[in-house]
Image: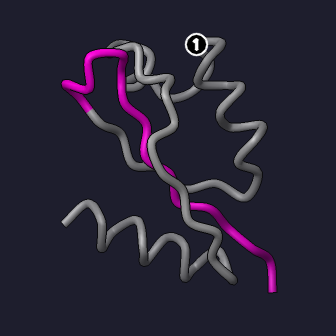
Amino acid sequence: MKEGFVYILSNKNRTTTYIGVTNDLERRIVEHKSGRGSIFANKYNLTDLLYYERINGMQNAINREKQLKN
């Protein structure tokens, strides 16, 4: 089963957060830091990784992301 990651990003002042899911955390963080992540994360300069979870199965990771967003 392929592993996934759920992660939380914030900006320098910790005023906004972003919750995302990916199968390659290192690549995704580099994308966010270079401005090629999500439009929302780029708009609010969300580049600081606050938290991540490694989860077995991408569907399980997506379900966990939805749980955190609620």
Measuring from the top left, give residue 55's x and y in whole percent.
63, 76
Q: How many marks?
A: 1
Region rendered in magenta: 1-16
Q: What element carries label 1?
A: loop
User: Which quadrant does the N terminus fall into?
Assistant: bottom right
Measuring from the top left, give residue 23's x and y in whole percent.
72, 58
14 or 61: which is nearer to us?
A: 14
Residue 68 magenta? no
Q: Quadrant of residue 32?
A: top right
**Viewed as shown, does residue 63 lie left or right of 14?**
right
Residue at (68% x, 82% y) in the render: 57
Measuring from the top left, give residue 60's x and y in whole percent.
54, 82
**Viewed as shown, does residue 30 lie left or right of 53?**
right
Q: In this view, does 44 lie above or below 24?
A: above
Measuring from the top left, give residue 44's x and y in whole percent.
32, 15
Residue at (56% x, 65% y) in the render: 53
The way the protein has been coloured in the rendering is one colour
Residue 7 magenta? yes
How many residues crowd around disc 1 within 10 Å: few (fewer than 14), some, or many (20 or more)?
some
Q: In which quarter of the image is residue 52?
A: bottom right
- Mark 1 — residue? 35
Q: Is residue 43 above or below residue 56?
A: above
User: Which quadrant does the C terminus fall into?
Assistant: bottom left
